[in-house]
């Protein structure tokens, strides 16, 4: 991740997001999935679109870990992606973008 | 320093890929520079499982290895590039874009193409072959506007194409030139049985048909046969055999067979010492091997010899045994299926009722198995094949090998332990039992996936996977280890154990359960499993722990293509008033929902956006509807026939009883969904015998059937008890359901649960009727608790602001998901394609 030229987009108050689950944020024409991984005390943001069949859905996916590595599973066909790197964990060719997140004064900011 | 040897592979199909993989592992890197040229737009994929593409397996999943694999291993891969010329003198190949690539060794792995008979009109629109992903894309696209498909060819591939056409919703007919189906694998009786099975699946079979011409103007309209008959079809798939792709070899002056194929010797060398041919393009002893296993063997031989620089390994005539993976119909033929010129005795079992035909050819001294044919059931295929290949001595009564084992008995003489260590279990990768067992022991492998990864066994056609699982069980047993089905990496317990622990520790949330009994953070496997157990034990509102529910349960609706949801209100017993019907129509119209009568006697409204769900349900609840739990692993429908309410044959009030049952068990969560039905007499119009629990009226009361299943692997329910009165029948169902809920694996339906239940039907009767475990009181109490605590989930959702507010697409905007797209179809809407 590079720090240059990050625009921080103020998405919503932290209370708008479920604990240990995801919700979708609209940023211009983009859809970004935000996950509050409370068990790890971390926040993640990724594309909302699942690259498998191009469905706008990842925010409704279940999160969890694989050998300690945080991941999200797409509800449609259960493809799983790393929340850290966006790589597909089944070893398939497609992956998702991940975005930095910061919390300030009770608000979730996404680096776009 | 010597230059690395330049190896060029033409063709990046299954065999071309396998060759690269074998060469890499054997050479260990360094001494070869490998270039692979493939004409298809993507790297090699699993053609054997091509049909899975129709059921949603993506091109990526079918891929043998991603493009990055070639890169990482230093292989130069050119896709979408066709070799048009070989210059054997200069040792250069030329591609269609003009690339010139020199080689020291050239490997032709050009495979074959579908054989297209020279029949007038084959060029018409709507005529397809079945070989590549692009062929399938074209078929899928064309099928959208087609109704009737004809498949030319009744062999292995033709029948697979037919099943695919059927799955695309087409009326499907198979046309075969020979007097029987699969003439190369089956005898007349076996082929007959297969024919009736295919016809039951809804596929028409036309034998002895020679196509004269394809009829139609621009697009095909039908087939005209030489016997003057005619078959209407707006789409044709030709699957009448393969033709080896030897055009390059011919042009280069290599020897080819009179009917095609690049002639090779024992070392797979062509008539030019620097060129080898492997896979479906190679002609060995006048034979083209149209299967993947011999192709892999060829790849292995050429790779081995290249690395050693001498001829260490040679090819031998290969076993052509096959098992067809058509859904619903098992067909296998192994060893010498016909034994035309070999003295032998045959043993035949034929069950027309069940559609089973089995033939074994036994040596005339009665000691060995020579080969055989299996239609309708091929569970023992792997074992029989091994007995044939390894010349194992037959048990005293070989018929036991093909008789269905009676419940509770093991199949005679057929345990994997009887196999010699040298038995080749996976013929695609040529891996022996010894190697597999050794790997299991030395590397502590615990599941089939690990065996696949470590030994590569089971990664080809997949036919040996059941045997791998048997070998695993057997080896672990020998080591004194028990094999436990654990839920996932986060819980070291079976579902039954965890269920018990949750109850004992009175843990009520996923977090509590994880802290007390698990590790890590959980995942998409254990979260819904635990959610289901919590619901079965405490029956609290599932929406309170929304993030551990599968998407369908999280939004109390089934998610569909495109991301909208379906709405299915409960209609107990299928009885519905005119006012309720009108109300459904009014709501559907208002929210522009697609309407369909389901196979479960109720109405499904599709296409609701997530933020519309509470609004729709609010209106439905107002007119008296409740959640139908179409999204949950819970009771779905209790179908009923009209019974004595109207029907002149009805002996009991089936509708009334179905309503009582549906209302009793609605909302109860189970390891998998539950279905039931009540029929008013033995004519069985409600199909109760295909349900998890089904009830059929008799003059004296009710017959109760348990553990039936429609779906993927249909199974009739077994008659559990007869002539029960209303209350006894319900008492037995209470106990049965609770017993299942407490002991099944996650996502295991009652039929599979029952099949694994040691002691079978007798045991189940003992537990439920005779209370042999002394748990019936407890089961009834637990069931009573679930019934008492029933709540309509949708009512709770719309009435609880905190839950209701979650039904939005965005958290920072009121807007609906702008990516949703619909198209019109038969005057209603449907989502745009993936
Ligand atoms: C709507 C319906 C088809 C229809 O248009 O008629 C349907 C639709 C679906 N079925 Fe079904 N099944 C429907 C009747 C059936 C039946 C017939 C019946 O119930 O009498 C069967 C065979 C009987 C059986 O289950 O034993 C059936 C066997 C399946 C199976 C295979 C189950 C199995 O054990 O093999 C699945 C997959 C699964 O559950 O894992 C499935 C799964 C599905 C899913 C949930 C697939 C999905 O995830 O999208 C579909 C949801 C549609 C939706 O959004 O509402 N559906 N499905 C039927 C709804 C009945 C209802 O009113 O609730
Ligand atoms: C629907 C279907 C189901 C099947 N089911 C089974 C089964 O159950 N069991 C089984 O054992 N087998 C099955 N087979 C057969 C199996 O797929 C083949 O035996 C296997 O794919 C052969 O591999 P190959 O590499 O020799 O040929 P292919 O997989 O055909 O690969 C050859 C490749 O070479 C390319 N090529 C050809 N000429 C050139 C050129 N001049 N330049 C560049 N590239 C070129 C082709 O485009 C192709 O990609 C099935 C086949 C099909 C179509
Ligand atoms: S409704 Fe059932 S049978 Fe039809 S496509 Fe969906 S899951 Fe398959
Ligand atoms: S759309 Fe996400 S896994 Fe298929």
Image (spheres, grey):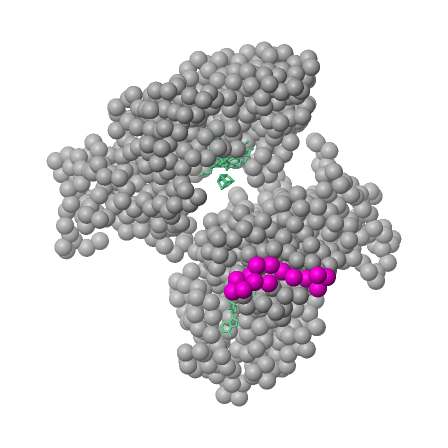
In this rendering, the answer to whether B400 lies above or below B738 is below
Q: Main secondary structure of the magenta part?
A: loop
Is residue B748 or residue B164 the one in the foreground? B164
Q: Position of residue B300 (x, y in %)?
A: 58, 67
Q: Residue furthest left?
A: A105
Q: Position of residue B588 (x, y in %)?
A: 37, 32
In this rendering, the answer to whether B621 lies above or below A81 is above
In this rendering, position of residue B62 left or right of residue B363: left
Q: Position of residue B426 (x, y in %)?
A: 62, 55
In this rendering, position of residue B591 left or right of residue B287: left
The image quadrant that residue B303 belongs to is: bottom right
In this rendering, position of residue B388 left or right of residue A66: right
Q: Is residue B427 visible?
A: no
In this rendering, the answer to whether B407 lies above or below B185 is above
Work out which quarter of the rendered image holds the N terminus of chain B and state it. Answer: bottom left
Q: Residue at x 40, y 37 (%)?
A: B594
In this rendering, the answer to whether A44 lies above or below B343 is above
Residues drawn in magenta: B215-228
Q: Residue at x 70, y 46 (%)?
A: B196
Q: Residue at x 46, y 15 (%)?
A: B787
Q: How many marks?
A: 0
Q: Residue furthest bottom?
A: B89
| Residue A15 within the segment the image draws in magenta | no
Q: Position of residue B23 (x, y in %)?
A: 51, 68
Is residue B474 or residue B648 the one in the foreground? B648
The image quadrant that residue B652 belongs to is: top right
Q: Is residue B206 visible?
A: yes
Q: Residue at x 32, y 37 (%)?
A: B609
């Amino acid at each position: 991740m590079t720090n240059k030229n990050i625009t921080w987009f103020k998405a919503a108050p932290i209370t708008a997001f479920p604990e240990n689950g995801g919700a979708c944020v609209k940023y211009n024409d983009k859809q970004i999935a935000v996950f509050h991984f409370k068990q790890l005390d971390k926040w993640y943001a990724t594309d909302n679109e699942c690259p498998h069949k191009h469905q706008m859905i990842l925010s409704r996916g279940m999160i969890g870990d694989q050998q300690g590595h945080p991941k999200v599973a797409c509800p449609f066909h259960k493809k799983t992606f790393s929340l850290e790197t966006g790589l597909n964990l089944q070893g398939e060719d497609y992956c998702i973008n991940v975005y930095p997140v910061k919390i300030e004064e009770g608000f979730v900011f996404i680096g776009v | 320093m010597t230059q690395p040897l330049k190896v060029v592979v033409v063709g990046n199909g299954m065999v071309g890929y396998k060759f690269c993989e074998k060469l890499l592992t054997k050479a260990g890197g360094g001494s070869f520079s490998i270039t692979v040229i493939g004409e298809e737009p993507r790297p090699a994929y699993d053609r054997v499982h091509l049909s899975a593409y129709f059921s949603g397996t993506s091109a990526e999943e079918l891929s043998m290895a991603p493009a990055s694999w070639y890169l990482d291993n230093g292989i130069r891969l050119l896709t979408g590039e066709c070799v048009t010329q070989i210059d054997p003198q200069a040792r250069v190949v030329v591609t269609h874009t003009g690339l010139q690539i020199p080689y020291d060794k050239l490997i032709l792995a050009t495979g074959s193409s579908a054989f297209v008979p020279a029949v007038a009109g084959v060029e018409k629109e709507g005529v397809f072959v079945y070989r590549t992903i692009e062929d399938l894309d074209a078929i899928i696209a064309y099928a959208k506007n087609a109704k009737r498909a004809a498949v030319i060819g009744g062999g292995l591939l033709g029948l697979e194409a037919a099943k695919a056409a059927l799955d695309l919703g087409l009326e499907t007919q198979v046309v075969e030139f020979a007097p029987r189906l699969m003439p190369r694998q089956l005898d007349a009786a076996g082929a007959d049985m297969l024919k009736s099975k295919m016809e039951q699946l809804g596929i028409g079979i036309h034998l002895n048909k020679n196509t004269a011409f394809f009829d139609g103007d621009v697009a095909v309209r039908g087939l005209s046969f030489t016997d003057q008959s005619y078959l209407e079809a707006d789409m044709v798939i030709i699957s009448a055999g393969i033709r080896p792709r030897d055009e390059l070899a011919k042009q280069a002056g290599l020897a080819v067979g009179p009917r095609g194929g690049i002639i090779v010797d024992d070392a797979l060398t062509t008539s030019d010492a620097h060129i080898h041919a492997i896979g479906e393009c190679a002609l060995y002893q006048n034979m083209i091997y149209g299967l993947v296993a011999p192709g892999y063997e060829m790849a292995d031989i050429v790779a081995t010899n290249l690395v050693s620089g001498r001829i260490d390994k040679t090819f031998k005539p290969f076993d052509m045994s096959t098992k067809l993976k058509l859904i619903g119909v098992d067909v296998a033929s192994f060893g010498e299926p016909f034994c035309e010129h070999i003295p032998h005795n045959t043993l035949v079992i034929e069950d027309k009722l069940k559609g089973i035909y089995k033939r074994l050819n036994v040596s005339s001294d009665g000691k060995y198995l020579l080969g055989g044919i299996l239609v309708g059931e091929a569970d023992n295929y792997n074992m029989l094949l091994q007995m044939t290949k390894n010349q194992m001595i037959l048990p005293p009564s070989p018929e036991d090998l093909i008789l269905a084992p009676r419940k509770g008995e093991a199949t005679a003489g057929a345990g994997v332990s009887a196999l010699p260590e040298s038995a080749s279990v996976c013929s695609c990768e040529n891996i022996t039992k010894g190697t597999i067992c050794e790997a299991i022991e030395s590397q502590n492998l615990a599941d089939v996936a690990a065996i696949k990864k470590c030994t590569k066994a089971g990664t080809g056609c997949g036919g040996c996977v059941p045997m791998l699982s048997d070998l695993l069980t057997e080896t672990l047993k020998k080591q004194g280890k028990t094999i436990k089905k654990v839920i996932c990496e986060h819980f070291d317990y079976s579902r039954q154990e965890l269920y018990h622990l949750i109850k004992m520790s009175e843990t009520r949330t996923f977090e509590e359960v994880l802290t007390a009994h698990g590790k890590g953070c959980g995942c998409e496997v254990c979260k819904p499993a635990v959610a289901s157990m919590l619901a079965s034990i405490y029956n609290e509102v599932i929406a309170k722990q929304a993030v551990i529910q599968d998407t369908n349960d999280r939004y109390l609706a089934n998610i569909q293509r495109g991301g909208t949801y379906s709405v299915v209100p409960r209609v107990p017993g299928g009885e519905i008033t005119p006012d309720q019907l009108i109300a459904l129509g009014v709501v559907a119209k208002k929210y522009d929902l697609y309407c369909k009568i389901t196979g479960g006697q109720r109405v499904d409204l599709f296409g609701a956006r997530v933020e519309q769900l509470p609004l729709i349900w609010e209106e439905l609840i107002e007119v008296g509807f409740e959640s139908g739990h179409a999204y949950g692993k819970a009771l779905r429908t209790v179908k009923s026939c009209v019974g004595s309410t109207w029907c002149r044959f009805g002996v009991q009030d089936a509708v009334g009883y179905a309503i009582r049952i549906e209302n009793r068990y609605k909302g109860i969560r189970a390891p998998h969904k539950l279905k039931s039905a009540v029929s008013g007499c033995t004519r069985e119009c409600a199909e109760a015998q295909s349900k998890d629990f089904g009830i059929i009226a008799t003059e004296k009361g009710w017959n109760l059937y348990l553990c039936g299943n429609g779906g993927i692997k249909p199974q009739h329910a077994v008659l559990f008890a007869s002539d029960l009165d209303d209350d006894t029948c319900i008492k037995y169902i209470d106990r049965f359901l609770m017993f299942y809920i407490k002991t099944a694996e996650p996502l295991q339906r009652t039929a599979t649960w029952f099949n694994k239940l040691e002691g079978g039907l007798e045991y189940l009767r003992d537990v439920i009727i005779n209370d042999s475990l002394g748990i019936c009181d407890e089961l009834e109490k637990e069931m009573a608790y679930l019934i008492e605590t029933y709540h309509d989930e949708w009512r709770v959702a719309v009435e609880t602001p905190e839950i209701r507010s979650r039904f939005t697409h965005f958290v920072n905007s009121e807007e609906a998901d702008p990516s949703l797209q619909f198209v019109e179809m038969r005057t209603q809407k449907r989502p745009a394609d993936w």
